[in-house]
Image (cartoon, rainbow, N blue to C red):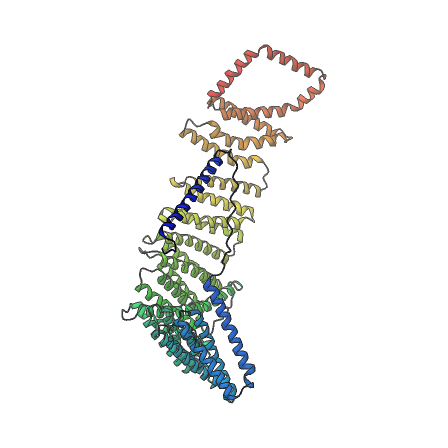
Amino acid sequence: MNTPLSPAEELALIDGELARLDARRAHLAARRDWLLRLPPIPWPSAPPPPSLPVKDASGRGAQNVLLTLGAVLLSVAALAFTLVSWGSLGIAGRAAVLAVVTVGALVAPLPLLRRGLRSTAESVAALGLLLTVLDAYAVHAVGMSTVDGTAYAAGAAGVLAALWAGYGFASPGLRLPLPVAVAAAQLPLPLAALASAADPVGLGWALLATAALDVVAAMTVPRARAAWPAGAVLGAAALGVGLVKSAATPGASAPALLLAAGAALGVAVAWRVPRASAAALAGGLAAVVAVAGPLSPRWDTGWAVPTHLAPALALTLPAAVGAASVPAAVRRGLARAGLGVTAAAALWALAAVVPSLAAARLRVFGEVWAVTTPEVDRPATGAAVAVTLLVTAGAAAAAARLMPARPEPGVLAVVLGWAGLFAAPVLLGFPVAAVLAAQLSVTVAAGALALRPRPGGSGVGIAAAGCALLGAGSVAVGALDGRLATVLVLGALTAAGAAGAAYRPGPGWARSGAAVLAVGWATALAVALCALSDLAVVWWAPPVLAVAAAVVAFGPRWGAVRVPAEAASTAPGVLALALAAPDRPALALALALAGVVCATAAVRADRRRLGWAAWALFVAATWVRLSASGVAWPEAYTLPVTVPALVVGFMRRRRDPAASSWTAYAPGLVATLLPTLIAAWGDPHWQRPLLLGLASLALTLLGARQRLQAPLLLGGATLAAVALHELAPYVVQVVGALPRWLPPALAGLLLLAVGATYERRLRDARRLRAAFGRLG
């Protein structure tokens, strides 16, 4: 270090500074020691550090806002100058202003880019591009005002798109010019079509050509990615124009050519771009309409749908055969297009079939067994609907063979095929007999398909079962048009259900369903046969019960479907009782027959529980019969319960001697003794109390002889109650004749006697209880 002092002087200065520092250090150390010897004092909390202001905007964000605002202000100023102050300048001034401002705005971004000011360069470039638009407007306003505005806009858009594209390539550091050039390039051809008063198809060609240019630009220029969405929008618009015109003018070739070109463009894009299956989808739809449009008749005939269906099915061929030479994106797109058109055709056909069939069947309810045949309103497109359903069903069946692991094609094939075959006779106007015969055949075929064993799954079987169920219901309703038709159809359905239940190779769920349906159709057949006869409705019950009897009689032969068949047989039983309910004699007969059916089933070892149901039905039948005959004696109602109950109790005691007499005999005895005792207390005559007393005495003696508690106690209690009933009038007379002080005196004497012999009475009571305990 260079200093003006001599070494000796500098050394003396350093020594002096060190001495002062040592003295200062000694003073601070002494002060610290003194502070440490002071008593503890709470230290004040340190003041919080001052909070720094939060910056809610980044530097780059603030810069972008400022640059954008500046560009907007300059653009507004340029626009105001062009629109307001332009006329005050001469031609030379105008040219100078345009040249200087526009060139300056377009050149200025280049040095800004070299200095790294990209955001500023983009803002100035945006201003320059806007100035070119204003220049174009100014040129038209001054020198070309006679030119059509739309035509001039088309040319100006093309020139500007070319200039902006060139400017973007010349300044690769700028991001804005090329996307703006792509946006401007969308306008020339459509505006030119509008300027030339082209028809919609001509406008569609302009849109499609622009979309093709967008695709080329996007595929060849890496920086022109904005052309993809623009091309997609214009291409979709062109295809939309073609589809609308093709639907409005069937047979026209102009829309077909436009759609064919669009289809080629979409497939070409999907061929080159692996992820562009949507382009192949749009191209496939356009190809379908392009092929079918010139051949399509009017839509109101219905044949336009099958015409479009044929090329749609052809589109799925590359995907179905898995052509290796076709890219996956193309295969997926074309297959989805074909499947979409096929699904739309199938939905159209189903929407036409359902109302027709529903209307035909509902009309039958108003004319059951009518003499005249009801007219069926068939749609004018009936043949086309039938063909569409059958063709789509065939396509689904072919897909099911090609894709055996997928259940959906098989299910669709079954549903569509059944719908087509079932509805075709109605749609084609066949006679009623032919319609019923054809529909019955289709229903039986669907049921047979449901019964076919399938180790790979049950989706097709479930679909076939559902179709068979719907078909059977529809045919049964349609058969109500005539008496003979009703009997024949219900008989055929009953036989088909029984055959399906007996088909042992079939799946269990299908056989069970067939058994239940067989019982149901047999019940309906019995009702129909009864309706054909002259029997009153209440006497339809025995024939209906015959269905349940047949199920029970052939129960062991049902095999695995015995349980669902017997469960379904309860329906005809309940129906028979409901039919006979208005007439008590008929109801008594129906109850008795139902009891016979249950008793027949209870004979088998695995159906013993039905014995209780049989007993209840027999008792109910007896009661109803007695009520119908005007019998009012309670014994007539209770003895049919008591006698079987005692027989059952006797058999129970024989099988199990340890069973209590209360369990075996008490329910049956109480069923008669209690109601008869109640009736005897209100009976002014002597016959019922006498007979009840004799029966109770016999029951008591029998219980004592056989050592059974229930008969002994119940009989004894009943006998005591009857005796009390008979002695009650005399007791009342005696009590009334005695002095009022005598009953309390007698009660006191009784208490004294009991108290005097208390222990002996307890011992006697225990002996009596032990004796009763030894009884059964």
Q: Nearer the viewer, residue 712 or 173?
A: 173
Let me know if residue 138 appears in the view.
yes
- The x, y position of residue 174, in whole percent, is 40, 73
Q: Nearer the viewer, residue 637 or 260?
A: 260
Q: Residue furthest top?
A: 756
- Residue 412 sits in quarter: bottom left
For the N terminus, the quadrant is bottom left
Q: Quick check: 572 above or below 334? A: above
Q: Quick check: 245 above or below 457? A: below
Let me know if residue 309 appears in the view.
no
- Give the tally of numbered discs: 0
Left or right placement of residue 144 versus residue 114 in this view: right
- The x, y position of residue 300, in whole percent, is 47, 76
Left or right placement of residue 564 versus residue 712 in this view: left
Q: Quick check: 37 above or below 260? A: above
- The x, y position of residue 494, in whole percent, is 41, 56
- Residue 243 sits in quarter: bottom left
Q: Nearer the viewer, residue 612 or 311?
A: 311
- Residue 607 sits in quarter: top left
Q: Residue furthest left?
A: 324
Left or right placement of residue 701 versus residue 443 in this view: right
- The x, y position of residue 602, in whole percent, is 42, 41
The residue at the point 41 percent across, 80 percent down is 163
